[in-house]
Amino acid sequence: MHEHLSPDEVAEWRPPWQRHEDGGQARSDTPADEPVDVTDEYARAVADVPAQAEPEPEPVQASSPVPEDVDLGAVLEAILMIAEEPLSEEFLSAVLERPRSQVRETLGRLSAEYTGDGRGFDLRRQAGGWRFYTRADFARYVERFVTDGASARLTKAALETLAVVAYRQPVTRGRISAIRGVNCDGVMRTLLARGLVEECGTDPDSTATLYRTTTLFLEKIGLDSVEQLPELAPFLPDDVTDIEEDEQR
């Protein structure tokens, strides 16, 4: 039973969290907008209130492994086809969430099948991982493809474009196309791949890429610098001045 309080005591009664720590009078110097300080006494008063259990977070769904009805060999082929470096069995096992032993067995089976079928490519374990390689039996044909592609003669269009770059450098693709009267994008890609021309900044007015000839170009034609290029005057038409004016317009 609680003791009966007198009217005066009832008037002076304050909740525990509004009393001074010494149990004296209620606070009177606290501004109305100041947050109330929760004391240890209030904490003890609410300690017996049972806390509601927080709901447990739902488990994060992990990525599912490759289903059993999907051909693991086909999946490995698709990945290795775009790999730029050998991929280890541990990495492939982690990505596909299949046992490492199963991945190793499948890779070995694929390699044996390619060899047995006489494929032009081979699947080999090298540098700690697996990757596709061209088969050594066909190396001479691959070498012929690479070297012939790099040493093939330039077409007439490529020679004309190269001459424009040599005499007008630095020059943009738009300027080259205007001089030749045809689009030069394909030919320029060929010259860039051959190492005969290169980028050399941008045009300050149009911000288009500028091109110039390379050192390899000078080596191929036997010159020390572009200043040694022969004069074009003997090869130009009589109305070259009109042509220049048309180009500027």
Image (cartoon, rainbow, N blue to C red):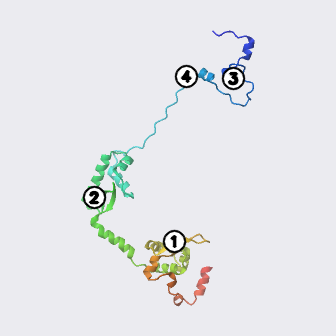
Task: Determine whether 127 is above or below 234 in the image.
Answer: above
Q: Mark 4 Cα within 10 Å, few/some/many (few <14, many 20+)?
A: few
Q: Amino acid under label 1?
A: Glu
Q: Earlier in the sequence, mark 4 or mark 3?
A: 3
* Pair 4/2: label in front: 4
Left or right of residue 75, residue 177 in this image: right
Name the spot of residue 231 as percent of width and height, x first. 52, 87
Name the spot of residue 109 as percent of width and height, x first. 27, 53
Q: Earlier in the sequence, mark 3 or mark 1?
A: 3
Q: Amino acid under label 2?
A: Tyr
Q: Are marks 1 and 4 in contact (CB under 8 Å)?
A: no
Quadrant in the picture for residue 153: bottom left
Task: Determine whether 36 is above or below 234 in the image.
Answer: above
Q: Are marks 3 and 1 in contact (CB under 8 Å)?
A: no
Q: Mark 1 Cα within 10 Å, few/some/many (few <14, many 20+)?
A: some
Decide which of 84, 27 is in the foreground and name it.
Answer: 27
Q: Mark 3 Cα within 10 Å, few/some/many (few <14, many 20+)?
A: some
Residue picked out by circle 4: 50
Residue picked out by circle 3: 18
Q: Residue furthest front?
A: 22
Q: What residue sits 33% from the left and 59% below the top?
A: 132
Residue picked out by circle 1: 199
Count of number-bearing discs? 4
